[in-house]
Image (cartoon, rainbow, N blue to C red):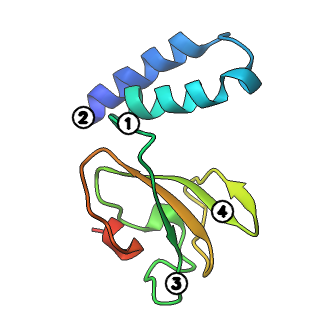
């Protein structure tokens, strides 16, 4: 999906969801639709989970400063049993559990493989 296609899909997604339903009842459908329609993730239910190890080169770095591969989405970071929806200032810390979604078929075996 090109940047233009993604922007167009995002605008349409906002139109589709503005004023749509109760966010508490629609949460799962919202996130699944966002991942599929805007990010092009064909099977968002197939997520990969990693634990951040001390050897991970991204420890302490902000997500915006890490050059992720094109088809990788960091969906959630779980730290101290709390779910973080990451943004550009989110950092990775040792022991975090990171949920990754990829639009491509990937056989990722370690967290370092998400970085270009």
**Front residue (pair 49, 11):** 49
Asked which secondary structure carries label 3, the reply is loop
Q: Position of residue 91 (x, y in %)?
A: 59, 69
Can you tell which of label 1 and label 3 is closer to the viewer? 3
Q: Is residue 89 left or right of residue 110?
A: right
**Front residue (pair 104, 68):** 104
N-terminal label among 4 and 3: 3
Query: Residue 11's quadrant in the figure?
Result: top left
Asked which secondary structure carries label 1, the reply is loop
Image quadrant containing the C terminus: bottom left
Q: In the image, which disc is placed on residue 78?
A: 4
N-terminal label among 1 and 3: 1
Q: Tag 3: Cα neighbours inside 10 Å, few (<14), some, or many (≥20)?
A: some
What residue sits 36% from the left and 75% below the top? Answer: 112
Q: Position of residue 55 (x, y in %)?
A: 46, 89
* C-alpha span from label 1 to label 2: 8 Å
What residue sits 48% from the left and 26% below the top? Answer: 33
Q: Are marks 1 and 2 in contact (CB under 8 Å)?
A: yes
Q: Which residue is mark 3?
A: 53
Asked which secondary structure carries label 4, the reply is strand
Query: Residue 83's quadrant in the figure?
Result: bottom right
Q: Position of residue 98 (x, y in %)?
A: 54, 64
Q: Are marks 4 and 3 in contact (CB under 8 Å)?
A: no
Q: Which residue is mark 1?
A: 39
**Front residue (pair 46, 34):** 46
Q: Tag 4: Cα neighbours inside 10 Å, few (<14), some, or many (≥20)?
A: some
Q: Is residue 23 left or right of residue 107?
A: right
């Amino acid at each position: 999906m090109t940047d233009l296609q993604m922007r167009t899909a995002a605008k349409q997604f906002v139109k589709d969801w503005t004023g749509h339903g109760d966010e508490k009842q629609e949460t799962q459908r919202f996130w699944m639709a966002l991942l599929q329609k805007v990010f092009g993730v064909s099977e968002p239910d197939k997520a990969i989970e990693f634990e951040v190890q001390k050897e991970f080169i991204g420890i302490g770095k902000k997500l915006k400063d890490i050059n992720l591969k094109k088809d990788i989405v960091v969906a959630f970071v779980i730290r101290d049993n709390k779910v973080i929806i990451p943004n550009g200032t989110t950092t990775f810390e040792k022991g975090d559990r990171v949920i990754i979604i990829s639009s491509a078929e990937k056989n990722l075996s370690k967290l370092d493989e998400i970085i270009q």
